[in-house]
Image: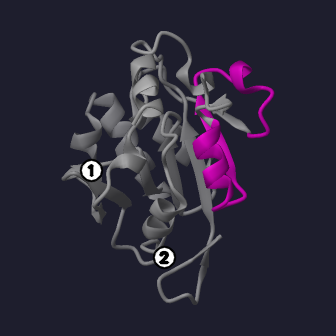
Amino acid sequence: MLPNLEGEITINITAFVLAGGFSRRFGSNKALFPYNGKPLIMYPLQLLSQQTESVHIIAKDTEPYAEMEYPVVVDAYEQQTPLVGILSGLKESRTDWNVFTACDMPFLTTEVFERLQNNVSPQPENDAIVPVADGQLQPLVAFYRRRLIPTLRTAIDENLSMKEWLSDLTVKQVKFQDNTPFQNINSKEDLHAADHR
């Protein structure tokens, strides 16, 4: 539960980590690949657990995550797009606001979530709260409202990209100077580079 900007209202938040990708460039399930002693997916899971008690994994299959202490939501569609994962999470959720992250972002910080959550409000104007770093939207570390379910279904049916879907929403942008927290791991070379930065 998170306070809004005025500190007067408590807002329930549901959190989801997207792990439904096929990891083609990585060569194996990168969500479970060890990095500094623990699977990549544990970094966002543990960070989100500090923000809310309701944290879920979204994946194509529950079996790889059976031994983890987090419930798994199975993707609603077979298509390979983050929009499917967001739709799957929003369908599972019972809260107005929901936070999503990718599974391969080990450098996310509490500060990122605190700055984003400070913009969470029960007021109706914003559909999403999305960080901006290096002039680019970072939609895989963002807050989305459950009311977006119909727009997501349409976007998936029409094969829209994440950028195209966001362009039709009312998005509150939160600017960050440092893009390090938003760097993701697409290959084992990326892990090697992270170890030596």
Judged from this view, the residue extending furthest toward the top is 27
Rendered location of residue 165, percent (x, y): 27, 44
Query: Who is closer to the viewer here, 111 or 70?
Result: 111
Rendered location of residue 39, percent (x, y): 64, 29
Rendered location of residue 21, percent (x, y): 47, 23
Q: Residues within 10 Å of mark 2 (few under 14, many from 20)?
A: few
Rendered location of residue 170, percent (x, y): 27, 62
The residue singled out by tag 2 in the image is 122
Query: Who is closer to the viewer here, 187 or 57?
Result: 187
Indicate the secondary structure of the residue bearing disc 2. Answer: loop
The answer to whether residue 194 is left or right of residue 132 is right
Q: How crowded is mark 1: few (under 14 residues within 10 Å), some or many (20 or more)?
A: some
Residue in the picture at 41% in, 22% down: 80
Magenta stretch: give its range. Answer: 42-70
* Tag in front: 2 or 1: 1
Indicate the quadrant where residue 171 lies. bottom left
Which amino acid type is shown beneath numbered disc 2?
Pro
As measured in the structure, the alpha-carbon distance from the residue carrying label 2 to the one carrying label 1 is: 23 Å
Indicate the quadrant where residue 174 lies. bottom left
Q: Residue 137 carries which label?
A: 1
Question: On the rendered image, what quadrant is the N terminus found in?
Answer: bottom right
Residue 139 shows up from this direction: no
